[in-house]
Image (cartoon, helix red, strand yellow):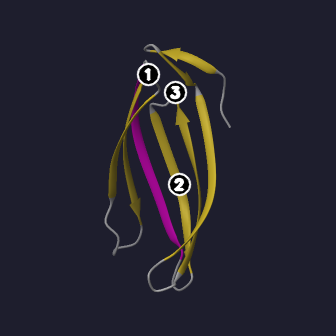
Amino acid sequence: LASPMTELVGARVPGFTTILNVDHKSDEYDEETWHAGGEISLAMIVHARVGVGVPEFGDNIMTWGLGLGFPYRWLRVRFDYAQQDNDYVEDQMSLLVSGEF
């Protein structure tokens, strides 16, 4: 779901977007995990995520993340930080660089 496009530092971006997702994975031990979550984004600059993981064995795992993006003309740069309330999983950081040619 996205709002109409707006002009920001030479880039056309939606003012507000919402994403909802559900995914499933199996690890090398055939343990299954379902995850459901959502993200809101303001002008492709500020991103906030929250979700819950439901493993086949064990307690549910809450997740959250924050992102900071910079849209400029055709270039998009985004830094993300994510954390889980699971002591065995390290915090995750990522950098995404993309362009529209």
| Mark 2 or mark 1: whose residue is earlier in sequence | 2
Residue 55: quarter of image: bottom right
Residue positioned 34% across, 57% down in the render: 92
Q: Circles 2 and 1: CB distance less than 8 Å?
A: no
Q: Nearer the viewer, mark 2 or mark 1?
A: 1
Where is residue 56? Give x, y as percent. Answer: 57, 83
Where is residue 8? Give x, y as percent. Answer: 48, 16
Q: Which residue is mark 3?
A: 43
| Mark 2 or mark 3: whose residue is earlier in sequence | 3
Q: Which residue is mark 2?
A: 50
CA distance separating discs 2 and 1: 28 Å
In the rendered image, residue 66 lying in the magenta stretch gets the answer yes
| Mark 1 or mark 3: whose residue is earlier in sequence | 3
Give the magenta part as a residue range.
60-72
CA distance separating discs 1 and 3: 14 Å
* Left or right relative to 88: residue 84: right
For the residue carrying disc 3, how many other residues have a C-alpha within 10 Å: few (<14), some (14-19), or many (20+)? many
The amino acid type found where label 1 is placed reads Trp
Q: Regarding mark 1 in the picture, which secondary structure is present there?
A: loop
